[in-house]
Amino acid sequence: MIPVELPPVLAGRDKELAVLRAALDAASQGRGSVLWVEGEAGIGKSSLLAAGLTGGDGTCEVLWGSADQLSHRFPLRVMLDCLQVRLRSPDPRRARIAEFLRDRRPGLFAADDVSYTATEMLVSLVDELCTETPTVLVLDDVQWADEASLMLWHRLALTAEELPLLLVSATRPVPYRQDVQTLRAATLRRGGTLLSLGALSADDVRTVVTGVLRAPPGPGLSRLVGRAMGNPLYLRELLDALMRGQATGAALAEGELPDEVLERVPASFADALSDRLSVVSAPTAQMLRTAALLGGEFAVTDLAALLRRTASDLAEGLQDAVAAGLVVSVGDQLAFRHPLIRQALYDSMPAALRAALHCEAARALAAAGAEPLRVAQQLLAAGRPGDEWARAWVVEAAPALAARAPDIATELLQRELQASPLDRVDQEALTVQLVRVLFGAGRHAEAADRARQALTMATRPEHRAEMSSILARTLFDLGRNEEAVDVVRSALGRADVPAVWQARLLASLSMFARASTGDLDTADDIAREALRIGEETGDAFATAYALTDLWMTHSVRRHHDAALGYAERALAVLDEAAEHADLRAFALDGRIFSLQNLGRWSEAEAILRRTRALAQRADGPGRGTSAVTAAVLLYWLGQWDDALAELGAVGPDATGVTYAGLRERGPVLLRHGVTAMIAGHRGDSAAAAEHLRAGHALPVRTVADRENRDFLLAAAALAAEQEGEPARALSLLSTLLDRAPGEMTLRYQWMPELVRLALRADDRAVGRAALQACQDEARAESRPGRAAVAVRRCQGLLDDDPGPLREAVGYYRSVGSPVELAETLEDLAAVLARRGQQAEARTLLGEAIDRYGAVGAAWDIRRAEGRLRRHGVRRGVRGPRPARARVGWEALTPTETRVAVLVAQGRSTPDIARELYLSRRTVQTHISHVLGKLGVRSRVEIAREALRREKLSDTGS
């Protein structure tokens, strides 16, 4: 749908039209692109797009969104308008997204970033739309677009070339915005096309005048239209003013104007607009000024509510406005024909009057049941805090605003707090809501300051308890564990603390106590008391939180059976509650973690995929496991390309890698560590170094940070060994020997590697320390598991004894742990070679190398060959292993092949995600890899390559 009138004559834009129509044709054939159109206000950007997009063959669906000054601070507003996401949409996908945004509220501990989740849903929607039909998205007046919409646009631009998707953005050079300029630079850097529109030439102006007036202009008329300075909008207003003048008919027929007519023609755009307004009645003009308060587009029902009239009362005036060329119809709404028209009407009202009218609009919209963001938009524009009604509304609407637009909620609350006078009740209500919003937005230092203020004024026990909880959480997230413990103990010391909050505070205290003192028994006692009270009060959050505390303490003790039981109980409690997505994700990750430690790899993988499937079907963002947890599991399963796809699908600061303070930066350390580890094993030293630098740049302040840095340390040790510095490698990996009380770190999974490095550096003391660490963990295991097997590996290496290593090989074969199996096969081969059993050593070396080759571990192959060559063992008659293909269909991993086949079948990214139990972003990462390896640019070309391969296969058979 194109909400812009086609100009009566379009001149001087032939080159730009050709570029636009070529891009439209390419999109209709499956090859997307990105266009960036820029030029001053009124220069004809929208008219160009309307003309170019109307001239296609009709195969593309055009969706259009326009930003304006009132909406630019509301996350995703313009993209929601562009994609027609509305509650009453006949498309259930769009309606579902609108319902999600309407109903979402921040969790007790800042469950998930609603804008982030909504962005994922919108990207999926665009993908599905493109699968159904080639799609064009137009974002007009980008200079006013909100930041979240700009980020979403950038996301779409990254993959537009792969889809039948044409992205067109139009913007003015002013006002200058750095984020818009950053998006522009990124668009052009990735091959986007720039269309820069300038003023029309004198010949082009003559063409327009001739086309509109049906006669070429004479000298006088040419001087008149010269006032427009080649600006098409002003030129049109001048010509329309002439057309409205009855006395000019005869003169125009001769292409000339008498002097008295020339004097009556508007001298400026503002005058031209006033002339246009003169053709509608005064009540209609005033109605349009009121409509300007609502933004560039407005619903008739909203305007009726603001004017306290019925829609039928407004019908005649609005029809006159349409006839006068002031507004146009856009779907089920009306829009000003040009933003400058709306701005001129808005600016024509005195500032004090505008402020009063915005306040009235806020009340009227709220009374009519409008969504909170639209009411907030009016209050922000009014800029008049202190009104009793507005204050009450802000307090009531703060949770809904915080979920969609936390910065807006923060500003409105702060405005009201700064207004005076405030009684104690209002001050408490506003401050408590502000603390909740700040904490949910991750602004922890500000939240802590405001929480302290709230505690000095709070009169309600539940407010005191909640503010204490948030203050403690912010301190804990900042690594100030002891202070957090003091805050919680002080809160629990009050006699009036509500039972629900007593349970929640105790659950937090258990976590803090474990992290600060490492006293697991005390943490257990506190968690069990929290669990008892939580179950008595029926509070799902406190109950599940306490159960995850017990999961944590039992995991640290290596009582993995019991830990698994607590994680499953927590999930059972949370499955009965719709909220607490962050805690649910934490418990899901804990369940997979426990299964890994029990060596139940296939179950862990099955649960990962089943959880993803449930999340996909339920459209429940936050209900699945994190990408980092999935990547760690896939690393140990030897599915390294899939692990990298998971990690590549999230940025280092994405909400998907944290649990709202439960583990903070730990998963980010893991993200860099796992990626660097795979790169190192594959011999990609540049990629490994990049992630090592990024990981080492992160502070290690909390226990969670220490618990999740093991991959990073192991990757750093691997890099040092590759650089010929085994002593430094040994020193780096030896850091893992030091496990603080209460710390989770799984030392045992790195100890066999530490023993190997120690023997290479002739430092048996470190080797024995590694063995001792493994033995300590194995003794702690409630059931012999991975730690016990790691002991056998360490013993076999230190004693040069193949027996324990054979046991480990047998275990890894039985449970399906390919990475550890390959490493142990290499170790066993080395021990046998030193004992003169070259034949068996050669066989085991061959299997180890085959397994390394399957995951692309080029470095491990070279190390294993060098290690065995010293004892006279080579791979023998196998010959050199064929290098892994880097391009072409043969270079695709099994998952990439399955993705490519599904793409060739015309399946959308969300469909593929559901089919393969992956996240949508992980599938997109796989598609990008497929495009790169096949050397193609779009999904259509993937389908062609698949068809060509199928024909070749049929011919060969």
Image (tube, grey):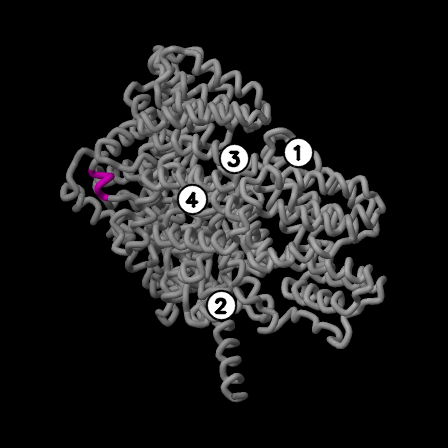
Is residue 601 visible in the rendered image? The answer is yes
Secondary structure of residue under mark 2: helix
Disc 4 crowd, CA 10 A, few/some/many (<14, 14-19, 20+): many
- Which residue lies under the disc numbered 1? 739
Q: Image point 51% across, 68% down: which residue?
A: 938
Q: CA distance from mark 4 to mark 3?
A: 25 Å
Stretch of the chain drawn in magenta: 300-304
Tell whether 321 sits left or right of 405. Answer: left
Q: Which quadrant is the N terminus positioned in?
A: bottom left
Between disc 2 and disc 4, whose residue precedes?
4
The spot of residue 659 in percent (x, y) is 49, 37
Q: Secondary structure at mark 4?
A: loop
First of labels 2, 1 by sequence position? 1
The answer to whether residue 338 is seen in the rendering is: no
Sooner in the amino-acid sequence: mark 3 or mark 2: 3
Secondary structure of residue under mark 3:
helix
Check residue 622 in the rendering and tell me which mark sits there, or answer none.
4
Would you identify the image quadrant in which residue 137 lies?
Answer: bottom left
Horizontal and vertical percent position of residue 114? 41, 41
Three-letter code for the amino acid on which mark 4 is drawn: Gly
Q: CA distance from mark 2 to mark 1?
A: 42 Å
Whole-angstrom CA distance, mark 3 to mark 1, is 16 Å
> Which element carries disc 1, helix, strand or loop?
loop
Q: Nearer the viewer, residue 770 or 238?
A: 770
Residue 301 located within the stretch drawn in magenta? yes
Q: Earlier in the sequence, mark 3 or mark 1?
A: 3
For disc 2, the marked residue is 898
- Tell me whether circle 2 and circle 1 mark residues in contact (CB < 8 Å): no
Specify the amino acid type for callout 1: Arg
Instruction: Name the amino acid type tagged 3.
Output: His
Dot placed on the residue nearer the N-terminal end, 1 or 4 = 4
